[in-house]
Image (spheres, rainbow, N blue to C red):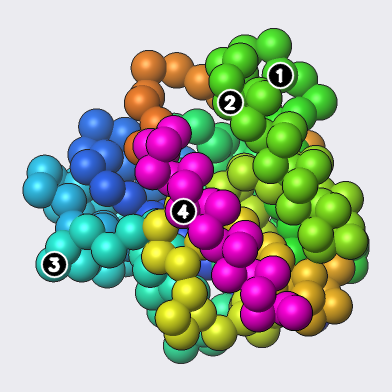
Amino acid sequence: MSAEVKQSGSVAVVIPAFREERHIGGVVRAVRAEGFEAVVVDDGSDDRTAEVAGEAGAVVIRHDRNQGKGVALQHGFEYAAAHGYEAAVTLDADGQHRPEEIRRFVEAYGRGDAPVLIGNRMADTSTMPLIRRWTNRFMSWLLSRLMGQAVPDTQCGFRLYRLDAIPPRDGASERFDAESEILLEIARRGVRIGSVPISTVYGEERSKVNPWTDTIRFFRMLRRYRRERA
């Protein structure tokens, strides 16, 4: 497979989005400017997220109701696989991830670094809110220990997955804990997980992670994973 195909034709960019009409147009245009197809999964937004994404040139998959990031990602992966893509890059819809850095993932993947690559923001955390820094370091330490692989920033949503490395998601986590569960299942299948350094970008966007309910979901997911592994 040629380097040119590796860089664009075999990689789709999947963007789960919920109430992101303010940012999604710019994100989609930036992704398309890098030469990639943008697949936006509008997860039941009650604003113009889907319309703005479509006007910017994205393929839009719409949910009638909010189902969670895990479900949105799954539907984006299914679209990419059905349309012949080999891999999918995922990034957030709020502008926290720089589309011009997609090629860092694609180039690392093309070199054969790993079939799954996770963005790493932890080399420079000076602009990262303190609570996120602590949470990311703790969860990354905990998940790395369970996976038997060192992944420095397991909470980063900027990722590349070779599509055949993604485990079946039937009955799995549906919300933000899904991204951690995906990594655990990938590691359990013996798939190597690599990292790619990315920029730490924080602006005026507000995280949709609920620090209480999503932390509870995370530990419930870990308990379920340990029970199933046992």
| Camera-side residue of 64 and 90 | 64
* Label 4 secondary element: helix
Can residue 35 be seen by looking at this rendering? no
Of tags 1 and 2, the one toward the viewer is 2
Most common SS among magenta residues: helix
**Please, what is the three-letter code of the amino acid marked with disc 2?**
Arg
Can residue 197 be seen by looking at this rendering? yes
The residue sitting at 58% across, 26% down in the picture is 132
Position of the C terminus, as image quadrant, is bottom right
Query: Can you identify the residue that label 1 sits on?
Result: 125
Extent of the magenta region:
209-230
Q: Position of residue 190 (x, y in %)?
A: 85, 78
The residue sitting at 89% across, 61% down in the picture is 148
Name the disc covering residue 132, or none: 2
Position of the N terminus, as image quadrant, is bottom right
CA gap between label 4 and label 3 equals 23 Å
Query: Can you identify the residue that label 4 sits on?
Result: 217
